[in-house]
């Protein structure tokens, strides 16, 4: 393999560093989460953030949106939320004697869906078409969403009262599922220092400036699409996803959409890391966030305390790495 860059990745590197520096003015830690969110942004994929309350899931999503010069929308999912509250509805105009469509909050470039598992299945299904096709269909009319379009959804894995399990078809439409962990003790000390010394958090967030424009993002995504992938890596990705479909610990394996997600994510991650070619390490690193929400454990394995990440690790150890 030729390890000389054929693409000019200087703009991607500078832009990503500028975004991370701006976010770092408010957010302490969570570097890996920020890296993967920016990877998803360049790969044009949606992200599911999972973590206990108080680990800055919502704040992280808001900060990423704040540093990009795009329209931002937020939807708080609740058990009484209706699909029309998300998508919009047609309202009769007595002056024109016609129904006029009033867009809902989903009509934004970056949409934060907070506590996505709080809404019932009827409202969950409202996201199916919009996540996959970037459009919605209401009353026989199709309304495309402006590009770029990214959903960042959050959920709490601990509290189950008043929540609804996300359908597998919806989970499969997320590029990544990221786990937001507790900060390290050193980072938590810095959080306390920041809260003690600075002005209010709302003022800090409002003071952030956009460092990435729409046209620039489109150009960066085009560069990512040109990242080189060796022929043997295509087979490597498929072997990993195919292994999930026959694994004895799994009731449901990954679909071909997971292979595409692994490819697109690996290309974006390579570009962020300053390379115009994908390596097996990129594929292995992203196998966890790409696959963990697409796999269903058997009842026996779940009772034993196993996790999808455990199965992904075993598969990565078994599948031969291309040279």
Image (cartoon, grey):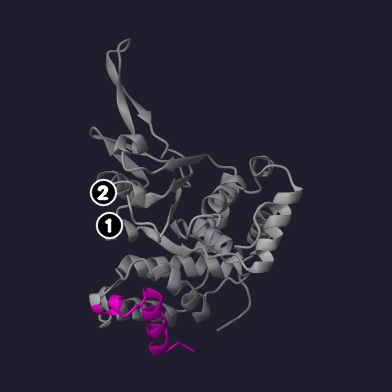
| Residue marked by disc 2 | 121
Can residue 38 be seen in the rendering of this structure?
yes
Where residue 163 sits in the image (x, y, percent)?
33, 52
Q: Residue furthest top?
A: 95
Rendered position, 49 above or below 86? below
Give yes or no for residue 301 being in the magenta stretch.
Answer: yes
Q: Residue at x 41, y 50 (%)?
A: 115
Q: Are marks 2 and 1 in contact (CB under 8 Å)?
A: yes
Which residue occupies the foreground of this view, 155 or 257?
155
Report which quarter residue 78 is drawn in. top left
Q: Is residue 124 left or right of residue 188?
A: left
- Disc 2 crowd rating (10 Å Cα; few below 14, some 14-19, many 20+) is some
Element carrying mark 1: loop
Q: Residue at x 54, y 55 (%)?
A: 54
Q: Residue at x 33, y 39 (%)?
A: 81
The magenta stretch is 300-323
Q: Is residue 30 left or right of residue 150?
A: right
Task: Report how far apart the C-alphas of labels 2 and 1 lie in the structure.
Answer: 8 Å
| Residue marked by disc 1 | 167
Indicate which disc, 2 or 1, sits on the residue closer to the N terminus: 2
Where residue 72 sits in the image (x, y, percent)?
52, 41
Q: Is residue 112 left or right of residue 189?
A: left
Give yes or no for residue 284 being in the magenta stretch.
Answer: no
Q: Residue at x 50, y 75 (%)?
A: 285
């Amino acid at each position: 393999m030729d390890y000389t860059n054929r693409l000019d990745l200087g703009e991607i590197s500078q832009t990503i560093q500028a975004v991370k520096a701006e976010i770092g003015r408010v957010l302490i830690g969570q570097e890996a989460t920020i890296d993967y969110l920016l990877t998803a942004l360049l790969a044009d994929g949606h992200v599911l953030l999972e973590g206990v309350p108080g680990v800055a899931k919502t704040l992280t999503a808001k900060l990423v949106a704040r540093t990009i010069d795009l329209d931002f929308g937020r939807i708080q999912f609740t058990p009484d939320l209706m699909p029309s509250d998300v998508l919009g509805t047609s309202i009769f105009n007595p002056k024109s004697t016609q129904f006029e469509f009033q867009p809902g909050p989903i009509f934004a470039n970056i949409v934060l869906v907070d506590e996505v598992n709080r809404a019932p299945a009827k409202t969950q299904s409202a996201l199916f078409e919009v996540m996959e096709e970037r459009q919605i269909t209401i009353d026989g009319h199709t309304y495309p969403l402006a590009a770029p379009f990214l959903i960042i959804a959050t959920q709490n894995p601990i509290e189950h009262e008043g929540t609804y399990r996300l359908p597998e078809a919806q989970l499969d439409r997320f590029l990544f599922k990221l786990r937001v962990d507790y900060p390290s003790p050193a980072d938590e000390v810095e959080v306390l220092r920041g809260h003690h010394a600075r002005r209010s958090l709302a003022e800090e967030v409002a003071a952030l400036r956009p460092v990435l424009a729409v046209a620039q993002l489109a150009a960066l995504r085009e560069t990512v699409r040109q990242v080189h992938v060796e022929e043997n890596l295509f087979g490597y990705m498929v072997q990993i996803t195919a292994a999930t479909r026959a694994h004895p610990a799994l009731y449901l394996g990954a679909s071909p959409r997971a292979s595409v997600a692994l490819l697109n994510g690996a290309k974006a991650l390579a570009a962020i890391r300053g390379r115009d070619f994908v390596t097996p390490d990129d594929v292995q690193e992203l196998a966890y966030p790409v696959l963990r929400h697409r796999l269903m454990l058997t009842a026996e394995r779940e009772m034993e305390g196993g996790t999808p990440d455990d199965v992904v690790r075993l598969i990565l150890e078994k599948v031969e790495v291309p040279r």
